[in-house]
Amino acid sequence: MLYSHLKKRMIIPAVIAVITLTVGEATAWAAATNPNDPYFSKQLHLSQIRAIEAWKIVNSNTAIKIAVLDSGVDSSHPDLKDNLLPTINLVQGESASDLNGHGTNVIGILGAKGNNATGVTGVLWNAKILPIKVLDKKGFSSSDRLAAGIRRAVNEGSKIILMSASTLYYSKALEDAVDFAEDRGVVVVAATGNEGSRVNYPAAFPTVIAVGAVTGSNTIHSRSNFGPEINLVAPGVNVYTTARGGGYDPMKGTSAAAPQVAGAAALILAKNPTMNPLEVRQLLYHSATKLNGTRWDKRTGYGLLNIQKAVMSTLPDDINEPNNSQQTAAAFPMESQIRGSLSEKDKSDWFYTDIPYEGTLELHAEVSVGNSAPLAASVYQDGKPQDTYYLGNKATATIPVKPGKVHIHLQRSGISSTIRYTITNRFSIAPDRYEPNNSIDQVRPLPAGNNIEIKGNFHTAQDVDWYSYFVRDPGKLYLRVDTDTLRLDPQIRVRKELDKTSGGIFLDNSSATDPLESLEMNVTPGRYLFQIQNSYPAAVSGEYFFQLNYMPERKDPNEPNDTYRLATKLGDNNLITGTISSEADNDWFTFSIAKETYVTIRAPYVPPQTKIMMSIFDSRDMKYAIQAENVSGQDNSIVFERKLAAGTYYLKLTSTTPFRYDAYRFTIARQEMYGGFRDIQGHWAKNDIGRLTQRGVITIPYTYSFRPDANMTRAEFADMLLRSMKAKNMHTGRVGTNTYKDLNKKHWAYESLLQASQLGIMNGYNGKIEPDRSVNRAEMALMIARAKKINVSKSSSVSYRDVPNSHWAVAAIETLSRYGWLHGYQDGSFKPEHPVKRGEMVTVFAKSFQL
């Protein structure tokens, strides 16, 4: 079992208090005045819960003991000492003093002496508070110690128990202690906790008043725990209270909220000393101020504590009315308790419960009529009738349920007299789909695949789930186990089935607020076993999510290619891919070219955090690389480009950081050279481009690229035009003065643009010559006509359907078309506004200048 690795589970401050009732001592009835405590003006929470108005009715209760299970108290604090009984210390090795400060804060909110012209006031001005120290100086305790504190409080005669501390995990000892308090007539109040998750224990038990926290504007505090078990909320921000050492400090969280409810319970008992714990709870819920427009919700429970209404109200027989139809059904949250009545005038009560998982809902009934089964409970799942269960006193009905909304319709069965009932519900999650898998003999194979996610749960105490997965090839396993509730804290053990020399790998991060467990491990072929269980061996209504990702080592399809003699031939393949499994692994590739070719190698993907060296060799000299370069971090970049002569070449890849689970990818592009360029072979204008290159009209850039299908810019046009004119010994004028504001002397075509302008061939626009703007086909016709000094004229008929006689360039277009220098498209159009392509322009220069 994994439990041997389990740390002692700790109770952390949130607020744990017990308020006990002892009858027979005086109760203080208040005058309608505010207390004279100097810091009362800082205690804004008291007006928020309407304590000031309540004090006009009652402000104290010294007739009962209120037990506060916390870190003790500063018993000499001037604002507390008159309301304190001697501290009971259950923490071995520490004095009874409050070494943490939490208990002193909590007790001040509950019962700092009021109207004594000192410091602050508690909800109770005068009280009899019994501090029971269960938290050590670091604020920690155990479930067993907390349970012992509850029993000690009950045995000391307490009638209210307050706990502003909590634990994430269920404890049978703690539940038994809470039940013991309920049986002895003790009201138990506890904070829900401050993780922003499900309600903690003991607040989560049905007979405990679970208290969350709100801000000063009555919005739920972001860290306040919530869920079906929450009952009430009270202020939990800047609650000004007593502090250790005789001082005062603000307190926040559900620890600050719970003592306000405990104080309210004491004031209720001051007015109604014969009330039992159920009646006190019901009156607090009934009198709460609704915050979200509903009678109950999972964030704020029944609403905000309203002490004025609590001490002024009379408890009705049924606080859930009206709930006589399915449409008006009252909330009956999971792990909670309801009380109601049925009579001739009120024959029907409806409730609903939101069910998060498949499982069973148990209804435990206490019925006032001794009939064997006087209460009929008809169950509806998502609006559809399921079954009817008949409940007598102390009877239990177990109802199978599925996720969704369950309605329960209560009616009398076979009797006409009035029934009073109390029903407590308990939810149990159903076994997950992989049960039974509680031992290695029942191990369940995980589904096939490399990426797997399953859901599981711990539906019983000490449930252990075993799974297996078969690894086909060496690789890595990535494991992740997370939960949907902090009440689950998974532990995992992983081992290979046949590995009997070790206990495998054990995972438990031991963090109560972070249940996530994850692991990355190398694996070899064989079956692996996974043992998962809750670190605290209790059944939990929640799920864990087990993710397994298997990444096999990539098989390099080109191996063996560790020497140039074993080099992989690329042929027409443009993709180079593989892995480098060790520093000794060299990957060689080879390719041959029959003619002068421009070769470009790109790196679409280089595995991150690897160092790959690429070397290129010519077979005619294998001693020295043409180029050697570190190509790491060059994703999608060009890592090699060069014009190569015909021959055979080798590419070598090495790495000082081997990788087996990823693959490099390089692409190689081979462009056969023609006319000095790498991108005109196969282009329809290649002959004209080659010829004009030989005539000096076109220059070859260092990239060997002509880009025949790119748009021709005005700068390129001017440069090529002037070169064409010079090739024909035509007068090209002079550079002249630059009057264009967008032309800098550093521009590569500065002289050509000014010469074209000086000759009247190229005009500017609004003081700009726009060197980088594309030339369109109409402009091309007009500038060629000007350069050739051709007298242009319109035709008697239109040659192109998109060049009417009114077009500004019609004469030039028509004239050059008659010369055969320009042509339209097959659809009868000329497209005068379309940009001229560079290859197209070359053919026009070749024709018009007879080059």
Image: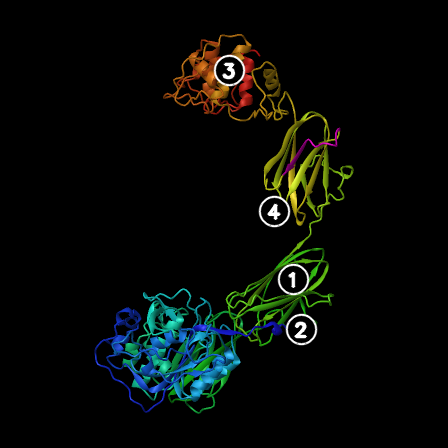
Q: Secondary structure at mark 2?
A: loop
Name the amino acid type tagged 1: Pro
Circle 4 is placed at which residue position? 609
Circle 3 is placed at which residue position? 721
Is 444 left, or right, of 45 in this rendering? right
Q: Residue at x 46, y 88 (%)?
A: 393
Name the amino acid type tagged 2: Ser
Which segment is the magenta one?
620-630
Q: Quadrant of the N terminus?
A: bottom right
Could one spot residue 413 in this view of the protein? no
Of the pair 696 and 84, the residue shown nearer to us: 84
Circle 1 is placed at which residue position? 447
As measured in the structure, the alpha-carbon distance from the residue carrying label 3 to the one carrying label 2 is 88 Å
Q: Earlier in the sequence, mark 1 or mark 3?
A: 1
Is 536 left, or right, of 279 in this rendering? right
Name the amino acid type tagged 4: Gln
Please state which of the two labelled residues, at mark 2 or mark 1, is closer to the viewer: 2
Query: Callout 2: few (<14), some (14-19), or many (20+) C-alpha neighbours within 10 Å?
Result: some
Name the amino acid type tagged 3: Leu
As measured in the structure, the alpha-carbon distance from the residue carrying label 4 to the one carrying label 2 is 42 Å
Q: Are marks 1 and 3 in contact (CB under 8 Å)?
A: no
